[in-house]
Image: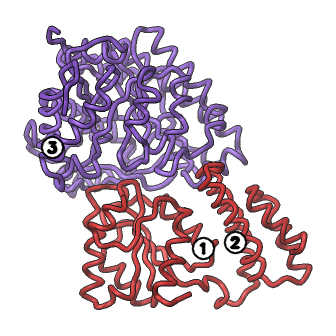
Amino acid sequence: MSESLQDVITAVDRMNDDGIIDLVQRCLDEGMKPIDIIEKGLSRGMDMVGQKFEAGEYYLADLIMAGETVMRATEMLKTKMDPGQTGKKGKVVLATIQGDIHDIGKKIVGMILESSGYEIIDLGVDVPPADIVEALKKNGAKLVGLSVLLTTMVEGIREVTERLKSAGIRDTVRIAIGGACCTQQLADEMGADAYGESAIAASGIYDTFRAELGMA
Amino acid sequence: MEPMSPVERVIRTMEGKPVDRVPVFCAMMESSTAGEIIGKPLLSNEAVMNMPVSRFILDRWGPMVTPVLFRPNLSRTMHRRNRGQVAMGFDAIWMHYDDTWVVLDHETVAFPTGSIYKLVPDGFGDLTYMYKKPGITSPEEFDAWPFWPDSDAVAHRAYRYYKKSMKLFGERTCVFGSGFAGGLQEAMNWTFGIDRVPLWIKKHPEYVMRYLDMMESLWMKMHTAMLEAGVPVILQTDDFAFKTGPFLSPKMIEEIFGTRYRKLIKHVHDRGAKYVLHSCGDNTKLFDLFIDWGVDGLHAYEPTSNVDIYNEKKLHGDRVTIIGGMGIDYHLTGRSKDEEVVEKTKELIRICGPGGRFLLAPAHSEDGMPSHKLRVMLDAAREYGAYPINVN
């Protein structure tokens, strides 16, 4: 691995958002392809951050800063890539359930997934179940992330799963849920496929979904 | 042991002294639940706010008419919530002071400390607020924010609210006084945006310090107002953690907030009152820090947050009062069965009750929480919570 690429990994790990652009530019100047810088530099850096987060060495604020560092570099690299090269792991439709307008956790999950190579279709907050199903159909997406903070809104998850069944696409779609009131028990009760306890877990969950759906 | 008054029971519990039974604290009460207990108001807030004339006025002159049109409504709502908690017979209640909002339009309000919320129907005829976005996204916006609170005026209004409330309820329950906005970290999260706070700390530390200076001064005055009104317990809300643990590292939390919290807590202790910190999320790595700051009690211990309340009892139960444990994710919802609430109450009392320093409580409140489930919890606590604890 080149020294410049290693420096990119280190910059992500150390959350050096100020220096990342220069380091990425150095990689480009050395002839590296943008997609390689993302996959072998930024993503690996983010993996290290994720491991440290799971080990309790890093905290949520560190995760956000590392994500910010990756996003800054990715935005710059996107301008030098063909559209088809970004988000090649697949599309993830993210939404906060109807009745709930909290979206901070969802935004962080989106940031982590995007830096892992997914294309994010963020429907925003207070999203009716019908709109979620419609977005899946319209975008040809098979992966969904539902965010819910409030216990009173959890039935919205069940409604999404029911609507997917009615639309005949439940078996080809995978749904993960997350948020303050969520548990594995709730995911089971509402018919979701997975519960993500942390933003960093999201990447692994969707990688598993891809494998299950034969997208990998 | 002779039966005690609620105040005596709660304060003695927090001091680690023997009491007659495990006290029960109500972690606030939303309008829908209060309405089940004391009856709904004749005219709902939702109806009032959605009248065409209200919309017309609020959309045009929201900030100007806030003191005369909006705050009296908030004041009535706060009193109704207090009445509901007291009517149920809780030993201690969360008495929240909240009439500091500024109306921007008929569906948007601002916290004077710099954050924006959406007013939404709670599904039961009242309105509730949900965080919408930070009010301040740049140093320029910080300097230009038009609603920074006049802390003396806010404290004065809070004093009148608590004075009146203490006269009404002070002998019937132990009042935990809680002021508007969040604590130092939480307020900062809402003002700057959680996903932007790390950047603010890194890029604009001088603004962060200015903000915290203002908040510390505001809280100092708010606490003084509550204490002078006779509130025996100050309850500070400050969500330091999420389900995955603290937002900032414990080291950073100590560096940024430690000195300020020590000062605030000492101020309360010097005036003979107790200090309780409510912090949602998995605070396992922070409990030692909080205790070192001097808190008398800690609240939430949500079952969904990964905090192991039973382990915490073992680790810290002799140094701090553990308050909470009853989940609002399942037990205090319409989805649970009464017998499950009874069993959970018994379990919490059996494990956390011995040795005292435990207040049974919901981890939070939520719109639509059935009052019946609170009643089941309360009744079970009275039946099984007598000292010495003997629960199978």
In the picture, which chain is purple? Answer: B
Q: Position of residue B332 (x, y in %)?
A: 21, 46
**Residue corresponding to mark 2:** A43
Task: From the top left corner, tell me how far across and down residue B303 is, in percent.
Answer: 35, 46
| Marks 1 and 2 close (CB-CB < 8 Å) | no
Residues packed near mark 2 inside 10 Å, few (<14), some (14 to 19) or many (20 plus): many
Residue beneath disc 3: B373
Quadrant for the N terminus of chain B in the image:
top left
Residue at 61% from the left image edge and 37% from the top image edge: B250
Looking at the rendered structure, the kind of residue marked 1 is: Glu
- Distance of mark 1 from mark 2, alpha carbons? 10 Å
Q: Nearer the viewer, residue B286 or B152?
A: B286
Mark toward the start of the polypeptide (1 vs 2): 2
> In the rendered image, which quarter is residue B39 located in?
top left
Residue, x 65% and y 84% (percent of image)? A86
Q: Secondary structure at mark 3?
A: helix
Chain ID at mark 3: B
Separation (CA) of disc 1 from disc 3: 42 Å
Q: Nearer the viewer, residue B90 or A123?
A: B90
Mark number displayed over residue A114: 1
Up-down: is B115 above or below B387?
below
Residue B148 horizontal/vertical position (percent): 51, 36
Chain at tag 2: A
Q: Amino acid at mark 3?
A: Lys
Q: Quadrant of residue B216?
A: top right
Q: According to the colouring, which chain is red? A: A
